[in-house]
């Protein structure tokens, strides 16, 4: 009995983001869930910037020309591309969650992985198409 009392108890501590990213192998559905939250946070934080761009594009012809000049900057294009990715990914992942809420049979490990792949592929294709349009490929 005395030996059991001497055995040290395990310590459970809060883990940091570095440990989550390096030590744990999340399944694909977990990574998509985290990216869904990150994309939603990006959209929320940059909402004033998006509203400014929308306002500048609709006010007048002169403001639209200044908007086009502002959007010709490469930094603004990259920020716009990141925000477009956030919107498209958040939209696709939101549709995935809605479909899972409507069909509870779709909530399994296999279907979670399959729908996560669909979300990543569809949002990537849409983001690439947006990037090609943004950078003038067509």
Image (cartoon, grey):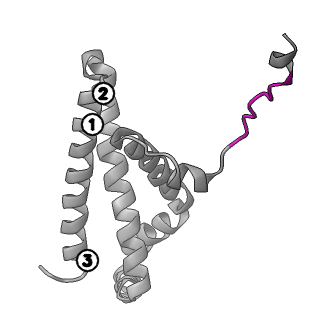
CA gap, disc 2 to disc 3? 37 Å
Q: Identify which residue is drawn at 43% across, 50% down.
A: 35
Crowd around label 1: few <14 · some 14–19 · many ≥20 (10 Å): some
Upstream in the sequence, badge 1 or badge 3? 1
- Residue 64 percent location from the top left of the image: 36, 81
Residue topped by disc 2: 109
> Given contact means CB atoms under 8 Å apart, are the residues at marks 1 and 3 in contact?
no
Upstream in the sequence, badge 2 or badge 3? 2
Q: Identify which residue is drawn at 47% across, 50% down.
A: 40
- Mark 3 lies on a secondary structure that is helix
Q: Identify which residue is drawn at 59% across, 52% down.
A: 19
- 97 relative to 68, above or below: above
Q: Identify which residue is drawn at 30% across, 16% down.
A: 104
- Residue 52 percent location from the top left of the image: 49, 70
Residue topped by disc 1: 113
- Which label is found at residue 69? none
CA gap, disc 2 to disc 1? 6 Å
- Mark closer to the observer (1, 3): 1
In the rendered image, is residue 33 in sight? yes
CA gap, disc 1 to disc 3? 31 Å
Quadrant position of residue 97:
top left
> Given contact means CB atoms under 8 Å apart, are the residues at marks 2 and 1 in contact?
yes
- Where does the magenta region start and end? 6-14
Tell which of 9 and 108 is nearer to you. Answer: 9
């Amino acid at each position: 009995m005395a030996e059991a009392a001497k055995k040290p108890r395990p310590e459970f501590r809060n883990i940091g983001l570095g440990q989550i990213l390096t030590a744990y192998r999340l399944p694909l559905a977990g990574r998509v869930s985290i990216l869904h939250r990150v994309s939603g946070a990006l959209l929320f934080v940059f909402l004033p910037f998006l509203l400014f761009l929308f306002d500048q594009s609709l006010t007048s012809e002169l403001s639209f020309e200044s908007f086009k000049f502002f959007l010709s900057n490469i930094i603004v294009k990259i920020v716009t591309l990141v925000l477009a990715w956030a919107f498209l990914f958040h939209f696709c992942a939101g549709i995935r969650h809605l479909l899972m809420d409507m069909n509870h049979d779709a909530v399994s490990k296999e279907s979670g992985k399959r729908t996560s792949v669909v979300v990543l592929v569809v949002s990537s294709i849409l983001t690439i198409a947006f990037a090609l349009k943004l950078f003038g490929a067509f």
